[in-house]
C-alpha cells in the first residue's frame, strides 16, 4: 500500500510540473539579422513567440566603433579582430550604450539608445505578427516614432519590421 501511495504521489507531482507548461503553450525563438538602421551596422533581433503572440523581444546592433573607446565583441583582440579596419572594433551598441548614447545626445537625442530599444521591445510584446504588420502598413518612419511610446529613434519602423521578421522565423 505504501508503494502504491508513493507512486501515486510521484505521478501527481509530475503532473503538477507538466500541466503549467502544457497550459501555457510552446515557446519558440526566432531571430533575424536585419539592416534596421542605415548601412553601417546590422541588428540582431530576437523574439520569443507563445501561442502566436510575441512573449518577449530583444534588440541589439553591431557596428565598427573606435578601438580603445568601445568594448569589442569577443575575440576582437584575437585572430577574429585582425581583419577589422585600422583603429576599429566590431561592437555591440547595447554593450556600449553609454558611449553611443553620449554621441546621440551630442546630436540632440534626449533618450538613451538602450532605453529606446527597450521601448520598441515593449511595444511589440503582447502583439501578433498580424497586429504588427497592420500597425506598420503604410506608415512613414516619422509616424512609427510617434506610435512607440518612449522611443525617439528615427528608424523605429526598421526595428519593428526586423522584429516582425524574427517573429515569422519563430513561427516556422
Image (cartoon, rainbow, N blue to C red):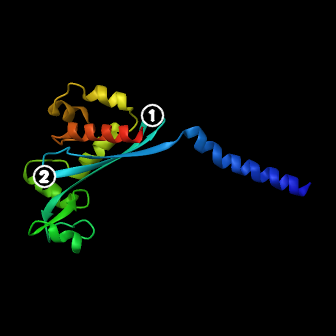
The correct choice, above or below, for 66 with respect to 153 in the image is below
Rounded to the nearest whole Å, what is the CA distance between mark 1 and mark 2? Answer: 33 Å
- The numbered disc on residue 60 is none
The secondary structure type at the circle numbered 2 is loop
- Residue shown at 15% from the left, 40% from the top: 154
Residue 85 relative to residue 171: left or right: left
- Residue shown at 81% from the left, 53% from the top: 7
First in residue order: circle 1 vs circle 2: 2
Say which residue label 2 marks. Answer: 40
| Residue 150 in sight | no
* Closer to the camera in the image, 153 or 35: 35
The secondary structure type at the circle numbered 1 is loop
Residue 136 image position (x, y, % from top left): 25, 29
* Closer to the camera in the image, 31 or 128: 31
Q: Of all residues shown, which one is farthest toward the right?
A: 1
Image quadrant where residue 106 sits: bottom left
> Cβ–Cβ below 8 Å for labels 1 and 2?
no
- Residue shown at 68% from the left, 47% from the top: 16
Residue 58 image position (x, y, % from top left): 33, 48
Say which residue label 1 marks. Answer: 52
Quarter of the image where the C terminus is located? top left
The correct choice, above or below, for 115 with respect to 66 in the image is above
Residue 22 relative to residue 3: left or right: left
Q: Residues within 10 Å of mark 2 (few under 14, many from 20)?
A: few
Residue 73 image position (x, y, % from top left): 25, 65
Residue 5 relative to residue 64: left or right: right
Amino acid at each position: 500500500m505504501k508503494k502504491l501511495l508513493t507512486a501515486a504521489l510521484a505521478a501527481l507531482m509530475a503532473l503538477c510540473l507538466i500541466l503549467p507548461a502544457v497550459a501555457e503553450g510552446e515557446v519558440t525563438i526566432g531571430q533575424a539579422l536585419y539592416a534596421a538602421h542605415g548601412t553601417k551596422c546590422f541588428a540582431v533581433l530576437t523574439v520569443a513567440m507563445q501561442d502566436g503572440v510575441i512573449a518577449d523581444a530583444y534588440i541589439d546592433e553591431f557596428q565598427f566603433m573606435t578601438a580603445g573607446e568601445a568594448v569589442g565583441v569577443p575575440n576582437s583582440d584575437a585572430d577574429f579582430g585582425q581583419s577589422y579596419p585600422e583603429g576599429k572594433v566590431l561592437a555591440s551598441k547595447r554593450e556600449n550604450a553609454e558611449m553611443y548614447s553620449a554621441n546621440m545626445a551630442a546630436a540632440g537625442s534626449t533618450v538613451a539608445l538602450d532605453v529606446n530599444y527597450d521601448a520598441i521591445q515593449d511595444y511589440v510584446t503582447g502583439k501578433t505578427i498580424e497586429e504588427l504588420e497592420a500597425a506598420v502598413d503604410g506608415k512613414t518612419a516619422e509616424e512609427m516614432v510617434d506610435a512607440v511610446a518612449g522611443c525617439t529613434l528615427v528608424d523605429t519602423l526598421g526595428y519593428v519590421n526586423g522584429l516582425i521578421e524574427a517573429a515569422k522565423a519563430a513561427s516556422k
